[in-house]
Amino acid sequence: MPWSKGKRIPTNLIVGFFGSGKTTAISNLINQRSAGEKWSILINEFGEVSIDHALVETDQKQIAVGELGGGCACCTMAFVFRPMLAQFIRQTKPDRLIMEPSGISHPANVVDILRGPNFSEVIDLRNIICLIDPLDFEDERKREYEVFQDQIQLADIVILNWTDKRDRAVVDRCRTWVESFRPPKQLILETSFGAIDSNLLDMKFETDRFPLFADAHPVPEQDQPELSVLDLVSESHHHEHHSEAQTESSPAPIPGRPLRFQNDGPGYDACGWIFHWDDIFNREKLLDLLGYVQPITRLKGVFRCQDDWWQINRAKDETSYAPSAYRRDSRLEIILDRKTSGWPEFERELLQCLSEK
């Protein structure tokens, strides 16, 4: 049934730390969508350069992908997130909305926005699903991180991903820890490659959940104009939706001189690049550089190479490569769990991977 005014949109949050497999899980869910259903996917990226729209590859006309980059929708980008979400709903009019907050977003603030007076008449918030890489549990710094804990605390369903790559003892310890949260999770499942059954999206649960650390990501105080979401989503005209660091007013990259965008947050540093379409990379040199550079929390990219377009997706020590259908430009986003001043030097190494004309 197509979306219509007065119908609340079934909405799910897919949360999890960097590299837990959220984007892959969303791609798997898309492939299970009922024929004819319009889905809108809104992805919040910590970095400034949008990559996930290239990784969530779909040629289905019933899928719309929007992105909000440059910070967390729960705090630093909260005042952009509200009007952007309203506009995205109006433009795409979905039968289902799936949202992927950034890896360090506090889901409580996002939930508050969705259940608040501006959106509650439009959004029907259903199950929150949290993906975990059990290896993150083994890292004491991450395990004690308040946002990481509240991603689990607020989830209805927790899915331990990467179980094909992790020792059984590590998976069991992580599962025992998740089982200690109160109120208990409705379901704790194990999977690999982000495989999620779409039936989980709408399972009925009654338990109310509250964060352990509600103030972990406070929203900056500033004047916020009132939104009239019902008016916004009922407007009849339709536009393409785009959200990324490079806008019409931004400078464009030129061959051999990419645009560089840096962003940081508590304990994390990010940098992204957008290259000109004419920049063609030597695939072997490029993948050798990106596959082994250390240390990395998250790395995502899509590149025009001599033989084809390729995407690289790296979390911790796991790296995957695949041909890409994306054709606009080459782009890369890297997230570190420490501050660095080495981005200009790394850019020079990237440029050395360009093929000689």
Image (cartoon, rainbow, N blue to C red):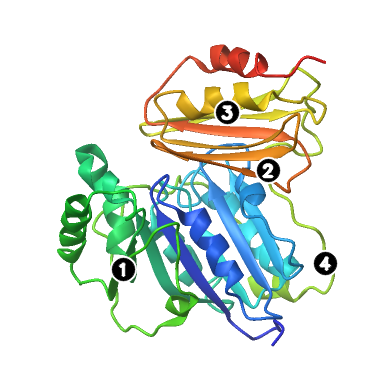
> What is the CA distance from the residue labelled 3 to the residue labelled 4?
40 Å
Callout in the foreground (3, 4)? 3
Q: Earlier in the sequence, mark 3 or mark 1?
A: 1
Q: Earlier in the sequence, mark 3 or mark 2?
A: 2
Q: Nearer the viewer, residue 239 or 355?
A: 355
Element type where label 3 sits in the image: helix
Q: Earlier in the sequence, mark 2 or mark 1?
A: 1
Asked if labels 2 and 4 touch by Cβ distance under 8 angstroms, the answer is no
The residue that disc 3 covers is 287
Amino acid tagged 4:
His
**Point 53% across, 73% down: residue:** 11
Q: Mark 4: few, some, or many residues within 10 Å (few <14, many ≥20)? A: few
Q: Mark 3: few, some, or many residues within 10 Å (few <14, many ≥20)? A: some
Asked if labels 1 and 3 touch by Cβ distance under 8 angstroms, the answer is no
- The answer to whether residue 127 is left or right of residue 211 is right
Asked if labels 2 and 3 touch by Cβ distance under 8 angstroms, the answer is no
The residue that disc 1 covers is 189
Q: Nearer the viewer, residue 3 or 328?
A: 328
Q: Nearer the viewer, residue 356 or 328?
A: 356
Above-or-below relation of 45 to 112: above
Element type where label 2 sits in the image: loop
- The answer to whether residue 350 is left or right of residue 295 is right
Callout in the foreground (3, 2)? 3
Q: Quadrant of the N terminus?
A: bottom right
The residue that disc 2 covers is 244
**Point 62% across, 55% down: residue:** 56
- The answer to whether residue 202 is left or right of residue 44 is left
